[in-house]
């Protein structure tokens, strides 16, 4: 371990790293966000960001050009924060309407203007997060033409049966599609080039907590089932392709016969390690991030979960090891 | 009998706020579920669409709330067959969908 960044008083809910400017932003239940910059001596110093929220912050993401970041919160609003040079501090602007509950997840469009937010009010919304102080007026795009800050460009309910918190949202690399996963165990894709129609797949797995595009048509999702899964979107359907984790539980060598007899004797139990899962992650996966490559062409991605493990997955090796798998 | 099942599932009053309508639909659906013999359950489940399986799961759980002679055992058979098609997801949707049966 190289550094301890100590500043927050309560649980840190979100963290994001800006690779070009090498800054880290963190947000916490203590209603604050901090931007961390690394000095020449390798030590990290921190600047407070005034989010002006009266509830916990839940998630944070740097914009692609790293000149601003968005923070979701339990205050039913999104804070868009940017650095004001004259006063040498981070300022925030709020997006409130019409969010009715906690914002749980955020993702930026590659044009640095549009933002998609998922919320506990079962909706996914695409907004403009244009900040006139730091950037030029954006031109129109498939999501909309009038783009003042806070303009709602699209709103999608997670389910027609109502219900299902939105756990994770992701803009595709070209920005035309938004994918999200909800607590009703569904995977959804909305396509702005197809009139913003939504394609929904209700899966037989436990709900997913993270989703990420790895190519323009392929999506990796992971969550309570502890295994990353690969799906593709082809305009009308979302299709299951493969489980990316096919590890089998290993027998613990020569002790297994003894252990089996002991547990049979003491607990009348035949299975000895029935709490050990047949997968690398032993508990829910809460976060998927790109590790190498881009959303248009990912090479590796990482997952972390409630079991405290951080696992890096290599798509090239997975393609070779799984029969008939082709990631396009 | 399988047609009767499809009929009650397709006409499930999910959007209704009238509790009486929902209760009536529940009674009818349970009658159909209990009338279909154990051997025919698998075939019946096989003929249903994914959405129908979700609605079936919702009725199975509602049915557990009102046990009658031997009904729970029969519903458990239904549950097993529906689960093998719908998986954990169909059970999650029983809990997370706000439009209840």
Image (cartoon, coloured by chain):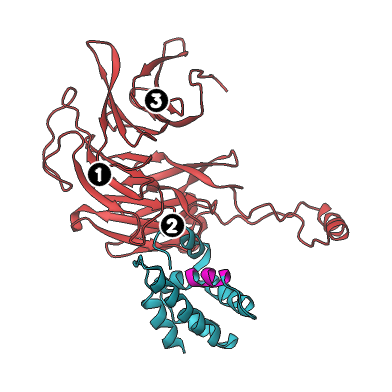
Task: Give the labeled residue for mark 2.
Answer: A184
Residue in front for this viewpoint, A64 or A107: A107
- Chain B's shade in the image? cyan
Give how far apart the Cα atoms at labels 2 and 1 are: 21 Å
Residue in front for this viewpoint, A55 or A92: A55
Answer above or below: position of A228 versus B80.
above
Magenta part of the protein: which range?
Answer: B58-65
Q: Residues within 10 Å of mark 2 (few under 14, many from 20)?
A: many
Which is in the foreground here, disc 2 or disc 3? 2
Dot 1 and dot 3 within a common chain: yes
- Per the picture, the main secondary structure of the magenta-coloured stretch is helix
Task: Give the labeled residue for mark 3.
Answer: A25
Q: From the rendered image, report the letter of the chain displayed in red.
A: A
Tell me residue B100's x, y (percent): 42, 64
| Residue drawn at 43 percent across, 57 percent down | A184
The chain ID associated with circle 3 is A
Tell me residue B24's x, y (percent): 43, 77
């Amino acid at each position: 371990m190289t550094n301890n960044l100590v500043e927050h008083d309560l649980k840190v809910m979100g963290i994001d790293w800006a690779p070009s400017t090498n800054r880290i932003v963190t947000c916490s239940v203590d209603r604050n966000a901090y931007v961390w910059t690394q000095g020449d001596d390798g030590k990290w110093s921190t600047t407070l960001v005034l989010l002006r929220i009266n509830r916990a912050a839940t998630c944070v993401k740097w914009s692609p050009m790293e000149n601003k970041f968005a923070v979701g919160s339990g205050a039913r609003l999104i804070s868009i924060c940017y650095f004001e040079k004259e006063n040498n501090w981070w300022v925030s602007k709020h997006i409130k309407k019409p969010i009715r509950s906690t914002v749980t997840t955020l993702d930026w469009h590659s044009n640095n203007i549009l933002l998609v937010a998922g919320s506990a009010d079962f909706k996914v919304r695409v907004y403009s997060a244009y900040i006139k102080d730091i950037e030029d007026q954006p031109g129109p795009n498939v999501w909309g033409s009038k783009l003042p800050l806070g303009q709602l460009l699209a709103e999608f309910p997670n389910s027609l049966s109502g219900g299902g918190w939105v756990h994770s949202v992701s803009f595709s690399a070209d920005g035309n599609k938004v994918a999200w996963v909800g607590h009703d165990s569904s995977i959804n894709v909305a396509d702005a080039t197809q009139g913003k129609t939504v394609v929904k797949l209700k899966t037989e797995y436990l709900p997913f907590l993270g989703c990420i595009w790895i190519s323009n048509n392929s999506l990796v999702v992971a969550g309570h089932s502890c295994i990353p899964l690969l799906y593709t979107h082809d305009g009308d359907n979302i299709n299951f392709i493969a489980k990316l984790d096919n590890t089998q539980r290993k027998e613990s060598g020569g002790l297994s016969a003894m252990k089996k007899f002991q547990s049979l004797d003491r607990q009348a139990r035949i299975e000895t390690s029935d709490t050990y899962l047949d997968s690398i992650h032993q508990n829910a996966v809460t976060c998927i991030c790109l590790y190498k490559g881009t959303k248009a062409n990912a090479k590796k991605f990482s997952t972390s979960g409630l079991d405290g493990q951080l696992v890096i997955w290599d798509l090239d090796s997975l393609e070779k090891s799984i029969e008939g798998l082709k990631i396009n | 009998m399988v047609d009767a099942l499809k009929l009650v599932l397709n006409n499930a009053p999910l959007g209704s706020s009238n509790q009486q309508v929902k209760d009536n639909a529940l009674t009818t659906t349970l009658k159909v579920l209990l009338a279909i013999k154990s051997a025919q359950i698998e075939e019946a489940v096989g003929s249903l669409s994914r959405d129908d399986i979700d609605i079936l799961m919702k009725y199975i759980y509602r049915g557990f709330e009102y046990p009658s002679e031997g009904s729970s055992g029969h519903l458990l058979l239904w549950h097993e067959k529906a689960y093998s098609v719908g998986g954990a997801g169909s059970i999650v949707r029983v809990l997370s969908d706000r439009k209840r049966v």
